[in-house]
Image (cartoon, rainbow, N blue to C red):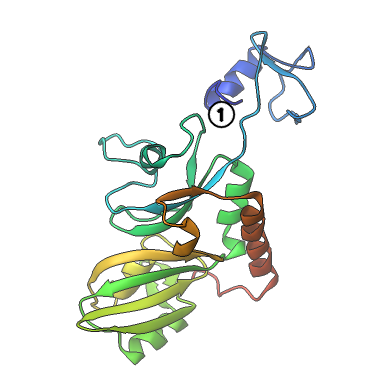
Amino acid sequence: MAGVGSRRRCEEFIVAGRVRVDGVVVSELGARVDPSRQRVEFDGRRVQPEPMQTYLADKPRGVLCTSADPEGRPTIVEWAVHAGANPRLRLYSVGRLDYDSEGLILLTNDGELAQRLAHPRHHIEKEYRAWTDRPVTREEIRAMLAGIEDDGERLRALAVLPEKTGARATCQIILGEGRRRHIRRMLEHFGLRVRRLRRIRIGGLTQRDLRGQALRALSAEEVAGLLASAKGATAGTPPPSGN
């Protein structure tokens, strides 16, 4: 319930009989309600539905993808509010980026949307640029495309594209499903040191879609495009398990 409390706290309110729908006390958890058609009240006060909003954000390094940190480090939600996100929304990130990584990430208060986009079977493509201490070799690229075993998990890339950028060694890596520290672990497996890692694409969204901003609210059409890319990934041939 928007502005009332966390999900667990709201469940306690429901069990206590403090929530009414169309004037009737609801004490059963999981009861379905349509806020656009039904009147929801908490302690006699009407609860307005929270507007669903999804943001495309450019996460800087040194920011945690969590809502709170016991060590007091800056979080993505705090950063997003400073960047212009609605402070009244209960936002959380769709997927994660490492503390030391940067780039595109989605923030939303739409739990159903987040689950659909983050579900492993959808395999929405995410593209990264990695700066390393040396260029990747052809043999290493072939191994990453085939998949490597690391700490009981299979890590695989859909594509690895080395780039020529003068003295700096960089490559673009595309993933279908991301594991914890997926790219860093994959590159470190071959002794490569990652100097910098940046996500540059999520599905069909790129840096250009930020339109020069650090954070931008997506339109309904853009959100629909993300869902379409998720469905398209599901319909296609999925990558091998554990990539």
Quadrant location of residue 37?
top right
Q: Quadrant of the N terminus?
A: top right
| Percent coordinates x, y for residue 195 in the rendering | 23, 68
Secondary structure beneath label 1: helix
Q: Is residue 44 above or below residue 169?
A: above
- The answer, for residue 178, to whether it is visible in the render is no
Percent x, y of residue 59: 37, 52
Q: Nearer the viewer, residue 126 or 86?
A: 86
Residue in the picture at 38% in, 55% down: 97
| Residue sitting at the far front | 212
Residue 107 in percent (x, y) is at 49, 46
Res 101 seen here: yes
Badge 1 is on which residue? 7
Foreground: 217 or 137?
A: 217
* Residue 84 x, y percent position in the rendering: 43, 39
Would residue 33 appear left or right of 51 to someone viewing this image?
right
> Which residue is at 48% across, 42% downward?
92
133 on left or right of 69: left
Furthest residue toward bottom: 138
Within 10 Å of the Cα at label 1, are there few (<14), some (14-19), or many (20+) other Cα atoms?
few
Q: Is residue 45 above or below residue 29?
A: above
How many numbered tags mark residues here?
1
Which of the two residues, 168 or 118, is positioned nearer the viewer here? 168
Left or right of residue 8, residue 100 in this image: left
Residue at image location 62% in from the left, 53% down from the top = 223
Q: Eyeballing the image, is 192 above or below 143?
A: above
Look at the picture and state if 243 lies above or below 8.
below
Q: Residue furthest top?
A: 44
Q: What residue appears at the point 38 percent right and 85 percent down from the top-left corner?
A: 141
Q: Amino acid at mark 1?
A: Arg
Q: Is residue 225 left or right of residue 197?
A: right
